[in-house]
Image (spheres, rainbow, N blue to C red):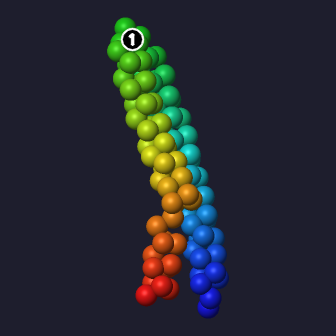
Amino acid sequence: MELAELIADVQGMTVIAVAIILSAGALGTALGFAIMGGKFLESIARQPELAAMLQGRMFLLAGLLDAISMIGVGLSLFFIFANPFVGAIEAAAGA
């Protein structure tokens, strides 16, 4: 197998891995927001006097949920633009 074919295979597998990372992050964030929003509305319906405190905590958790998906986006961009696996293949082929 030639070096160009190996690099193309690694890049193709990297694209699939990036798609899995992004889709899992999006799905997890969507489910997290849905569950959190439902529980927030349930707790407000039970004890309306705690609405302000619960709303602040809900927004804090919403920020943390978004941070998790943004970490996935950052890792995906790293793998797309600075793929460490391609460098390893080129180093092994040069040795």
1 left or right of 31? right
Out of 56 and 94, give the one closest to the viewer: 94
Name which residue lies at 40% across and 31% down: 61
Where is residue 52, by image quadrant?
Answer: top left
Q: Residue 90 location in percent, x, y?
A: 50, 78
Identify whether 58 is placed above or below 33.
above
Res 76 visible: no
Q: Residue 47 location in percent, x, y?
A: 38, 14
Out of 48 and 10, give the one closest to the viewer: 10
Identify whether 26 is placed above or below 58.
below
Crowd band around label 1 with a 10 angstrom C-alpha radius: few (<14), some (14–19), many (20+): few
Q: Residue furthest bottom?
A: 1
Out of 56 and 44, give the one closest to the viewer: 56
Residue holding disc 1: 52
Name which residue lies at 59% across and 84% down: 3
Q: Quadrant of the C terminus?
A: bottom left
Res 22 visible: yes
